[in-house]
Image: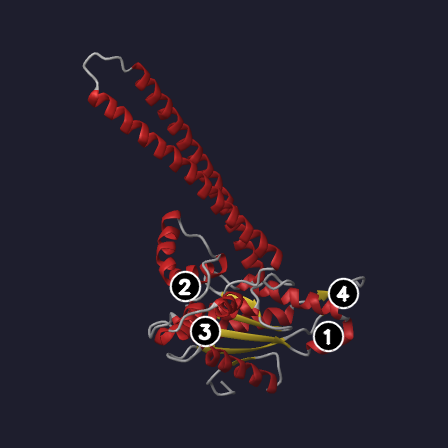
């Protein structure tokens, strides 16, 4: 999802990140760069808020703090992926450095030859034979051309390697933010998206939030087994995918709990969507493995809330969760809107 910046834009982020990295007490390694890249790019509001909080009043980040920020806000990438990415970047940077050094050596030698040739030309008499000097100059010119071509080829290859590494990091991040069973976003990813949405809210736009929980899910598992319970979760996840469009985001928030963020949907529209999803779940039938009969009477309870200007993501989520609790407490298989009378 994430690193889709152009070469020019990423170079600008590098220019902004390096001074910030240099002021810290952590080394200039890939983990540190990832933290500050996302900070200056403005793509990770929770990370930015955490860094701003830790560095206020002139405080700096040490190695431990940098590592904590990376693991908490950037990537749950397994160690093998981290190692390959780090080694890959180090190799690409080493190749670029080596090629640039070789080209620099050739350029220096070429400069010396030009100076000597110019001096010989200045002190020579008209008509004097300069064939040897010209041959030397031509030979070094060819060497310089070959060195420049080699540098370009190595830079192109390093850029391809870096792009491949970026793709690997991107996939690893996507995997880290996805629920393994349903393919929906997981809780960690949703919390980050919700925080970003809330931080971008203004008085003219109030996002809405749905929280749904499968009714009597423990009873389903006890009666039909956990494999069937997984089929129920998958079935409801598919209903959510079919009904969540555009900028809206659905996630599996817990074992049998789902959330939907509607960044640009007012409360009335959110309530309508919640009723539609609840109704579709109530009508669904899920087949058991090795049985012809399908199991029905599967329902969900839903809580709906609309964002109140100035509240935190935690409070916003808490009001939707309280509405869900009321749905459960009032008999389940129903939608309750936060702040509305129960008979509404």
Mark before the other along the chain sequence, 2 or 1: 2
2 or 1: mark nearer the eye: 2
Residue at numbered disc 1: 220
**Location of residue 97 with respect to 308 vertically, above or below:** above
Q: Dot 1 surroundings within 10 Å: few (below 14), some, or many (20 or more)?
A: some
Residue 134 lies, in percent from the top left, at 31, 18
Inter-mark Cα distance, 3 to 1: 30 Å
| Contact check, label 3 and label 1, Cβ < 8 Å | no
Inter-mark Cα distance, 3 to 4: 35 Å
Residue at numbered disc 2: 39
Closer to us: 247 or 168 = 168
Q: Looking at this view, name the residue that lies furthest to the left.
A: 126
Judging from the image, what secondary structure is the residue with disc 4 in? loop
Q: Which mark is residue 204?
A: none
Residue at numbered disc 4: 288
Q: Dot 3 surroundings within 10 Å: few (below 14), some, or many (20 or more)?
A: many
**Location of residue 141 with respect to 46 vertically, above or below:** above
């Amino acid at each position: 999802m994430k690193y889709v910046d152009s070469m020019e834009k990423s170079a600008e982020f590098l220019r902004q990140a390096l001074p910030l990295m240099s002021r810290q007490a952590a080394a200039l390694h890939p983990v540190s760069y990832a933290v500050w890249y996302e900070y200056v790019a403005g793509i990770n509001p929770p990370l930015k808020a955490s860094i701003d909080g830790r560095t206020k009043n002139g405080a700096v980040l040490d190695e431990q703090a940098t590592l904590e920020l990376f693991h908490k806000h950037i990537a749950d990438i397994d160690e093998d992926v981290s190692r390959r990415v780090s080694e890959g970047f180090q190799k690409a940077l080493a190749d670029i450095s080596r090629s640039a050094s070789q080209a620099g050596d050739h350029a220096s030698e070429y400069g010396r030859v030009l100076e000597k040739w110019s001096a010989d030309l200045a002190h020579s008499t008209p008509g004097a034979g300069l064939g040897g000097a010209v041959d030397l100059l031509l030979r070094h010119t060819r060497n310089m051309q070959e060195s420049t071509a080699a540098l370009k080829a190595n830079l192109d290859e390093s850029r391809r390697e870096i792009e491949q590494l970026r793709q690997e990091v991107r996939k690893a991040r996507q995997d880290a933010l996805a629920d393994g069973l349903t393919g929906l976003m997981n809780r960690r990813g949703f919390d980050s998206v919700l925080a970003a949405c809330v931080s971008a809210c203004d008085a003219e736009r109030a996002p809405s939030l749905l929280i749904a929980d499968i009714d009597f899910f423990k009873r389903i598992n006890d009666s039909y087994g956990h494999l069937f319970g997984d089929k129920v979760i998958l079935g409801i996840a598919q209903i959510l995918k079919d009904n969540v469009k555009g900028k809206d985001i659905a996630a599996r928030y817990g074992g049998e709990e789902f959330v939907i963020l509607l960044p640009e949907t007012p409360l009335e529209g959110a309530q309508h969507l919640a009723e539609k999803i609840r109704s579709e779940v109530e009508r669904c039938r899920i087949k058991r493995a090795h049985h012809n009969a399908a199991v029905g009477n599967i329902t969900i309870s839903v809580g709906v809330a609309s964002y109140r200007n100035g509240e935190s993501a935690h409070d916003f989520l808490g009001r939707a969760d309280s509405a869900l609790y009321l749905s459960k407490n009032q008999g389940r298989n129903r939608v309750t809107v936060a702040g509305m009378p129960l008979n509404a």
